[in-house]
Image: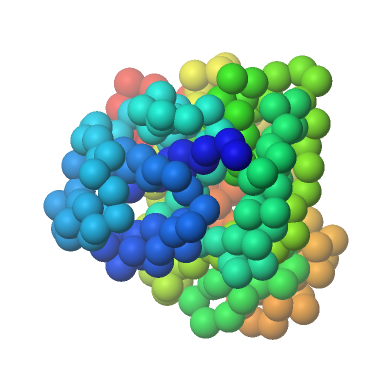
Amino acid sequence: MPKISACIISFNEEQKIEDCLRSLEGIADEIIVVDSLSTDRTIEIAGRYTDRIYHQKFLGYAEQKNLAVSHASHDWILSLDCDERLSPQLRQAVLEVKDALDERCAYRMPRKTFYVYRWLEHCWYPDRKVRLFNRRNARWGGTNPHDRVVLDAGVNVVDLKGDILHYSFSSISEHLRTIDSFTEIGAREIIAKGKPVSLLSPLSHGLWTFIRLYILKRGFLDGFAGFVVATLSFMHAFIKYAKVLMHQRNPGRSRL
């Protein structure tokens, strides 16, 4: 039977990391945690489940996750964030394929988000993610902060039943703080790539994001939470491109 290394990155996740690690029991043959110098009880809690804990100042999401993979003893990697856990159905699905993991395949699973007070069934669902893969033909890439698993040519994607349960934001204030942080990272990525941005970019990207989540993905069926998510997602896109424009107009003084 192939062995699986679970890889986790963390920073001040004492409220969430234990449920994440507990959901991996009986699935993972080892757990790797790369921590970005937490100042709370994250390391203490993680130590109850693994002694493979590494300390690294944050390098970027993809970079930090690739570092965790590099410390793994096994080629098969199961990756979760601290605010995620395997649902019972997904645990069973992973156990069913574990005996016959195909090196030509990567395994994808839907992610369901709990937002403040309810599960989102539409605007951020199913949000399928490749999270079980062989590191010999896959690695973390994408554009920070939206990292993703990049597969070599010829690797097939197999969908598993069951959800990654994602406990995202416990309040609108927390969501707003993340928007400020992620838009800075995203704006720097756009600037670094030299992507053209016009005066219309903040509004056009923001409106498209709202329409896609609230109308095309039927986020209105998620009630008031769906409206809040679509509106703040509009803000996220708008602010990211607005920060780029501000930098272009005053590159010497703009701090994004």
The quarter holding residue 68 reads top left
Tell me how many marks there are: 0
Q: Is residue 230 visible?
A: no
The residue lying toward the viewer, choosing from 84 and 177, is 84
The percent position of residue 156, horizontal first and vertical second, equals 80, 31
Q: Which residue is at the far front?
A: 1
Q: Which residue is at the far left?
A: 39
Answer with left or right where residue 114 lies relative to residue 59: right
Residue drawn at (69%, 63%) of the image: 162
The residue lying toward the viewer, choosing from 148 and 131, is 131
Q: Is residue 13 visible?
A: yes
The percent position of residue 83, horizontal first and vertical second, equals 44, 60
Residue drawn at (38%, 45%) of the image: 31
Q: Which residue is at the far right?
A: 216
The percent position of residue 8, horizontal first and vertical second, equals 40, 45
The quadrant of the rendering that contains the N terminus is: top right
The residue lying toward the viewer, choosing from 50 and 178, is 50
The percent position of residue 50, horizontal first and vertical second, equals 29, 48
Rendered image coloring scheme: rainbow
Residue drawn at (77%, 48%) of the image: 159
Answer with left or right where residue 63 lies relative to residue 158: left
The quadrant of the rendering that contains the C terminus is: top left
Answer with left or right where residue 187 lies relative to residue 109: left
